[in-house]
């Protein structure tokens, strides 16, 4: 039996209740229930309305928007991976029984907080025949699919019958990451987009160039020119030869295309930022003549500064598939406001001309009109600190659009004397004034200095994570853990939802486990807390049997196994089917080095555990190319019982041996810049599991990986 769209709505309208309610998802979904449920296990098809199969969303920030058909195919994969539902995707002129029908349409409820029509709205209707999704655009329909998966996850596949109209309060929602001072691999950014998307966040702002704190009074010119600074895009174009000196910590065009495409596939736009004229030491290191006395700032009056910046942008603009690009323009010399304004306006004109007005430009809030900045109204501001500006009075009332990244939710990775390292639920649910946070909270100290919720010039909010103290302060996945537990709650507020903290905590664990196309927790499926156990007993010469019962058998590459012992020498190793284990874990083993030569004990995609590093013999964990060493060396020709433990944001090593008292040590990161603000801080490193040995010479026994890190 098939029901046409018209008959479905005609029948359903007579029975739907008038009482407005909502479903507890993240964000919440307005929904009026009519009674009873529809079990999603009955679904056999996703039917895409034939009229809109190739429709795309022209109003969002991406220049590579997926079609409705492409969103449907991604949804199909998610239903399989998350809910175990194997459904077909087809096109049709009408809905059919036991199908999810995706179509497009207009609805008076598709309005944002300002009362303006939004292309991201959708209507969700569930009855005894299945589900109908009506999106304002393909992107709106995509957000509905996130709701369907979340409802099914929390309801054991049962969807309540009824309907609801949902729309975001603000158009820009998500997070910003400082990639300039800490490199994040391609796959990490893609996985983060999956995380953002599941909670209906549509923007990932990637800060692609920066340098460590540069104090002209503390550093000589030579020290400044040698300070850590990075530019993360790698081009073979002669015009920018020498700008990027970190090829192995950069993105090629192919990689950056892949990041943007994979993120757009899930409704998330990458907003790229190349920072200048401040935070521009990497450019000055390339062309020292362009720097002011503070070499992190470009001398805008130098005749080659603007041409150089235009060359950089001309090279990389074709890489960027977003309608908005960010030129930084943060924290510049306050005596040069006129030069600053000229720089911003000149770059704005250049970018619009180069892209035939397909791209607009954004800058950080730095200088205000009352300070003499006369920036074009076509440039949008991104606010971060009320000491730099008062967005409502300085920008909004002067006709500028403003994106909120206020330092109320500002994070600094690893350590900071001023800012937090982890986003907390308290700041989101209780806010600066005892009420839930909102994207209109630009000033957390003075409520009267904030615009109304309905102000149309508030673009939205991005939560910023900075790496002020550079790449060794954190691991790659520390960024995810800074946001993990609370960013979805913020997503509800960015959307305009009203989920309470109690409601959020009641659904978070189940929803978190359902986020598709990522494994940022580096979780490993296991039948018990024992994930892997190699006791090297009865192993085939080419296979190591996993005694845990999980079947994670290893493959031997050139090593000898005898007497329940793995003999590692001449570069041999054992390959496992695993990669990394995230928090929390205990990796225990017995080891007997027979050589002073440094070598790898365990290696994985996120880290390596080595017995010595370079010229030192210390036990060392390496993550993101950064070594974290202990004041400890495994004794030669002696058996030692070792446990590598990841507990929360700490990593520990416990060692003991015959006649030796057990000793526990903590891996720490030494955080600071050239002698300034030096502190020791915890570092969380994932357990490396892809490979055992290679380069290490010695014996190993009884390797056990367990989920959990019990207190001693």
Image (cartoon, grey):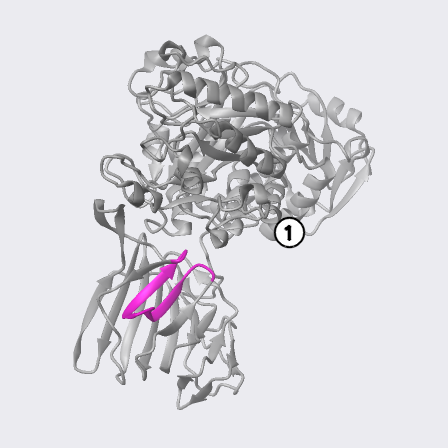
Q: Which residues are magenta?
A: 605-625
Front residue of 310 and 256 = 310
Question: Is residue 168 in view?
Answer: no
- Give the residue number, with chain letter if any, for mark 1: 80
Q: Is residue 157 magenta?
A: no
User: Is 417 left, or right, of 412 in this rendering?
Assistant: left
Question: Is residue 638 in view?
Answer: yes
Position of 369 relative to 549 (above/below): above
Identify the residue at horizontal 36%, vertical 18% (top origin): 389
Snapshot quadrant of residue 270: top right
How far across and down, in percent of the image, does residue 313 sit?
56, 33
Position of 702 relative to 77 (above/below): below
Q: Main secondary structure of the magenta part?
A: strand
How far across and down, in percent of the image, does residue 712 sit?
22, 63
Q: Is residue 609 magenta?
A: yes
Instruction: Give the quarter of the figure containing the N terminus.
Output: top right
How far across and down, in percent of the image, does residue 52 sit?
77, 31
Disc 1 crowd, CA 10 A, few/some/many (<14, 14-19, 20+): few
């Amino acid at each position: 039996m098939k029901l046409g769209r018209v008959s479905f709505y005609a029948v359903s309208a007579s029975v739907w209740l008038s009482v407005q309610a909502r479903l507890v998802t993240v964000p919440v979904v307005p929904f009026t229930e009519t009674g009873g449920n529809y079990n999603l296990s009955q679904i056999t098809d996703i039917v895409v309305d034939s009229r809109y199969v190739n429709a795309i969303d022209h109003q969002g920030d991406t220049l590579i928007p997926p079609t409705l058909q492409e969103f449907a195919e991604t949804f199909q994969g998610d239903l399989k991976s998350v809910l175990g539902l194997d459904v077909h995707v087809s096109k049709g002129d009408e809905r059919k029984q036991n199908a999810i029908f995706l179509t497009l349409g207009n609805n008076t409820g598709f309005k944002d907080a300002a009362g303006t029509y939004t292309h991201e709205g959708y209507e969700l209707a569930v009855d005894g025949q299945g589900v109908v999704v009506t999106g304002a655009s393909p992107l709106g329909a995509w957000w509905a699919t996130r709701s369907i998966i979340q409802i099914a996850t929390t309801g054991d596949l049962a969807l309540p019958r009824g309907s609801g109209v949902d729309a975001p309060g603000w158009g820009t929602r998500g997070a910003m990451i400082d990639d300039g001072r800490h490199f994040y691999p391609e796959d990490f950014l893609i996985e983060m987009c999956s995380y953002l998307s599941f909670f209906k966040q549509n923007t990932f702002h990637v800060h692609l160039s920066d340098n460590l704190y540069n104090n002209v009074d503390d550093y000589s010119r030579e020290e400044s020119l040698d300070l850590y600074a990075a530019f993360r895009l790698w081009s073979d174009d002669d015009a920018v030869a020498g700008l990027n000196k970190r090829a192995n910590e950069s993105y090629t065009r192919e990689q950056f295309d892949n990041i943007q495409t994979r993120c757009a596939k899930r409704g998330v736009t990458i907003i790229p930022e190349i920072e200048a004229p401040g935070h521009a030491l990497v450019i000055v290191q390339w062309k020292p003549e362009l720097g002011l006395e503070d070499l992190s700032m470009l001398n805008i009056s130098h005749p080659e500064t603007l041409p150089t910046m235009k060359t950089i942008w001309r090279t990389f603009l074709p890489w960027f598939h977003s309608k908005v690009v960010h030129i930084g323009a943060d924290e510049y010399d306050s005596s040069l406001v006129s030069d600053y304004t000229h720089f911003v306006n000149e770059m704005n004109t250049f970018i619009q001309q180069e892209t035939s007005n397909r791209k607009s430009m954004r800058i950080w809030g730095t200088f205000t009109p009352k300070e003499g900045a006369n920036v074009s109204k076509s440039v949008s501001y991104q606010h971060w600190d009320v000491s730099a500006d008062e967005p409502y009075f300085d920008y909004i009332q002067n006709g500028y659009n403003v994106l909120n990244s206020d330092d109320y939710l500002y994070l600094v990775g690893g350590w900071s004397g001023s800012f937090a390292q982890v986003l907390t639920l308290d700041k989101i649910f209780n806010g600066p004034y005892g009420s839930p946070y909102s994207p209109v909270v630009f000033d957390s100290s003075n409520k009267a200095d904030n615009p109304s919720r309905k102000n149309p010039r508030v673009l939205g909010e991005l939560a910023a994570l900075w790496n002020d103290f550079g790449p060794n302060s954190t691991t790659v996945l520390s960024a995810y853990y800074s946001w993990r537990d609370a960013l979805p709650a913020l997503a509800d507020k960015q959307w305009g939802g009203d989920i309470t903290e109690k409601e959020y905590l009641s659904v978070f664990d189940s929803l978190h486990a359902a986020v598709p196309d990522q494994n940022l927790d580096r979780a490993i499926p296991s039948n018990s807390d024992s994930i892997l156990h190699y006791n090297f007993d009865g192993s085939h010469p080419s296979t190591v049997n996993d005694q845990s019962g999980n079947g994670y058998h290893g493959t031997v590459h050139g090593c000898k196994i005898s007497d329940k012992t793995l003999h590692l020498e001449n570069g041999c190793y054992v390959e496992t089917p695993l990669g990394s284990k995230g928090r929390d874990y205990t990796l225990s083993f017995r080891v007997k080095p027979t050589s002073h030569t440094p070598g790898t004990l365990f290696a994985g995609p996120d880290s390596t555990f080595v017995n010595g590093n370079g010229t030192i013999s210390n036990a060392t964990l390496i993550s993101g190319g950064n070594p974290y060493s202990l004041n400890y060396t495994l004794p030669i020709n002696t058996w030692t019982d070792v446990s590598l433990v990841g507990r929360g944001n700490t990593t520990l090593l416990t060692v003991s041996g015959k006649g030796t008292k057990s000793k526990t040590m903590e891996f720490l990161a030494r955080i600071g810049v050239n002698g300034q603000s030096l502190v020791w801080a915890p570092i969380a490193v994932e357990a490396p599991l892809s490979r055992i040995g290679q380069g290490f010479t010695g014996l190993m026994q009884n390797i056990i990986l367990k989920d959990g890190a019990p207190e001693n």
